[in-house]
Amino acid sequence: MSQAFEIEVYGHRYTIRGEAEESYVRELAQQLDERMRILATKMKNVTPMQLAVLTAINLTNELNQALQQQQEHTDDLNRRAAGLIDSIQETLGGNR
């Protein structure tokens, strides 16, 4: 069931409506707020909109890096599994 509740990010209140648990969305908002505030301490003369966009770019970069690492781990596991299958088949007397 869809529910509506308010969150606050970087001093601005937003009404959120969706299926996600309110506590989860509040945690996401808190993390976003923290990331924006950390970035704001490193920059001067930046608007909240610019800060939000820069934070989104940083988060998207982190997501892409995590997805790339996940794909590399999956590829590595697939190579290892194929090697083990080949080894087992060889030990058992050839391809089946």
Image: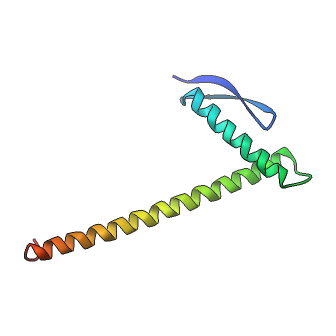
Identify which residue, 50 or 45, lies in the foreground: 45
Total count of labels: 0
Q: Residue at image x 76%, y 46%?
A: 36
Quadrant housing residue 86:
bottom left
Q: Residue furthest left?
A: 93
Q: Is residue 13 left or right of residue 94?
A: right
Q: Residue at x 57, y 61 (%)?
A: 65
Residue 62: x and y, percent? 62, 57
Above-or-below relation of 62 to 29: below
Place of residue 22 in the rendered image (x, y in percent of width and height, measured from the top left) = 59, 27
Q: Quadrant of residue 13?
A: top right
> At x 40% / y 63%, what residue is drawn?
74
- View extreme (right): residue: 45
Horizontal side, residue 60 vs residue 94: left or right: right
Residue 80, image quadrant = bottom left
Relative to 72, 26 lies left or right: right
As drawn, is 66 to the left or to the right of 17? left
Q: Looking at the picture, how far across and down is residue 30, in whole percent?
A: 68, 37
Is residue 2 depicted above or below 67 in this figure?
above
Q: Nearer the viewer, residue 26 or 50?
A: 26
The picture places residue 17, in percent across and down from the top left corner, at 62, 27
Colouring chosen for the image of the structure: rainbow
- State the residue at coordinates (86%, 55%): 43
**Image quadrant containing the C terminus:** bottom left
Image: 67 above or below 14: below
